[in-house]
Amino acid sequence: MPVNFPPAEMNVLLLYDLNPHWTPSEKEEVAEAHSRLTGALSSAGYCIDLLPVVDQHFPQRLGSFDSKECVLFNWCDGIPGLHQSEWMVARQLEQMGFVFTGSDSATLSLSYDKYRVKEALDRGGVPTPRWRLYKTSQENGWHEFPAIVKPAFGHCSEWLTSESVAMNEKELHDRISYLVDKVGLPALVEDFIDGREFHVSLWGNGRVEMLPPAEMDFSAFSDVHDRLCTYDAKFIPASVHYQNIRTVLPSTLDATELEELERVSMAAYKAIGCRDYGRIDLRLRDGVFYVLDINPNPDISEDASMASCAEHAGYSYGDMAGYLIKLAAKRHPVFGCKTAPPPVEPGAVN
């Protein structure tokens, strides 16, 4: 349950990454996103302080805040200059005694390791595409096509392009060689499910709830190689994938399909220990929803999937962010003393 503490009496510290090497336009884009979030929270009555993470010395600046007097909104994707360091930020917050939104350091670290995530899903009986880990480009033994080749470590569709989909052994070997020999990462090969894709936003602890799911529409592409959410689809506005993959919200699923999607998504959420909120990416084939990826701390920008799904369920941007704060505040030694039942979600699936 979230807390029932008046927002005006709850200090919130927004922690976010700000890379000094970003271009002026990139810094401006980030500043606008933070302004929208702080504006929405301020309108909801919260007192907000901001603290940018610009280098490894952020704990020194964080030391001027009292962990007993605030809840920390963790919107930090990592320490600038340190690749895949999101979990390191969370670990530092834990060591300093701060209560913060989102998953703990162990879950964030696990989520970057696709091999361990796959093992967790298999142990939990959660449907996920058949897979195999390749540590060298000389291994063979995969004969199921189409297949998809992903880096075994990472997030945000890093190194995912149309060439990641392999229709035969040559394409498969070429892509494995690229990742292993050139990029320097182990390759995770999966059965490529050329079916409908859904992005499912969940929130809660104990009682987890699913927001209206979004569907990715790949109908603009006739080539199987192009029917996936690549890195460009997420971050390069001028790219073909960014411009032609359409988001359908809400998705068109019948009651039985929606119930099964919710069941599988929640099982995946719990399999790696997501906390407060998360997003599960799945594909549907022959009545089975297969988990592709688990995002413990997905993007909560106003135009991102999480906020869009929450809005469709009847939550304003400020309502959504405030709910995440209240979920985290339940763990706070001061603010956590007041609890209230979760609000009824007007558009969510129960």
Image (cartoon, rainbow, N blue to C red):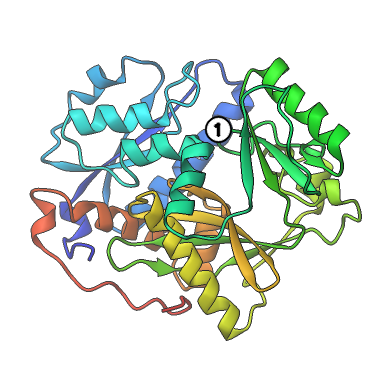
The quarter in which the C terminus is drawn is bottom left
User: Between residues 131 and 287, which one lies in front from this camera angle?
Assistant: 131
In the image, is 253 to the left or to the right of 121?
right
What residue is at 40 percent from the left and 54 percent from the top? 271
What residue is at 15 percent from the left and 66 percent from the top? 339
- Locate residue 124, reporting x and y percent: 42, 57
**Is residue 236 visible from the viewing direction of this image?**
no
User: Between residues 234 and 314, which one lies in front from this camera angle?
Assistant: 234
User: Between residues 82 and 50, which one lies in front from this camera angle?
Assistant: 82
The quarter in which the N terminus is drawn is bottom left
What residue is at 8 percent from the left and 50 percent from the top? 334
Q: Quadrant of residue 139?
A: top right
In the rendered view, would you say 147 is above or below 280? above
User: Between residues 231 and 54, which one lies in front from this camera angle?
Assistant: 231
Q: Quadrant of residue 178?
A: top right
What residue is at 27 percent from the left and 64 percent from the top? 206
In the rendered view, would you say 193 is above or below 346? above
Q: How many marks?
A: 1
Furthest residue toward bottom: 255
Amino acid, disc 1: Gly
In the rendered view, would you say 111 is above or below 140? below
Task: Classify 10 Å Cα crowding around label 1: few (below 14), some (14-19), many (20 and above).
Answer: some
- Per the image, the residue denoted by label 1 is 154
In the image, is 251 to the left or to the right of 304?
right
- Locate residue 138, reporting x and y percent: 73, 22
- Locate residue 188, reporting x and y percent: 63, 36
**Is residue 1 visible from the viewing direction of this image?**
yes
- Locate residue 53, reporting x and y percent: 38, 24
Furthest residue toward front: 141
SS at badge 1: loop
Furthest residue toward right: 222
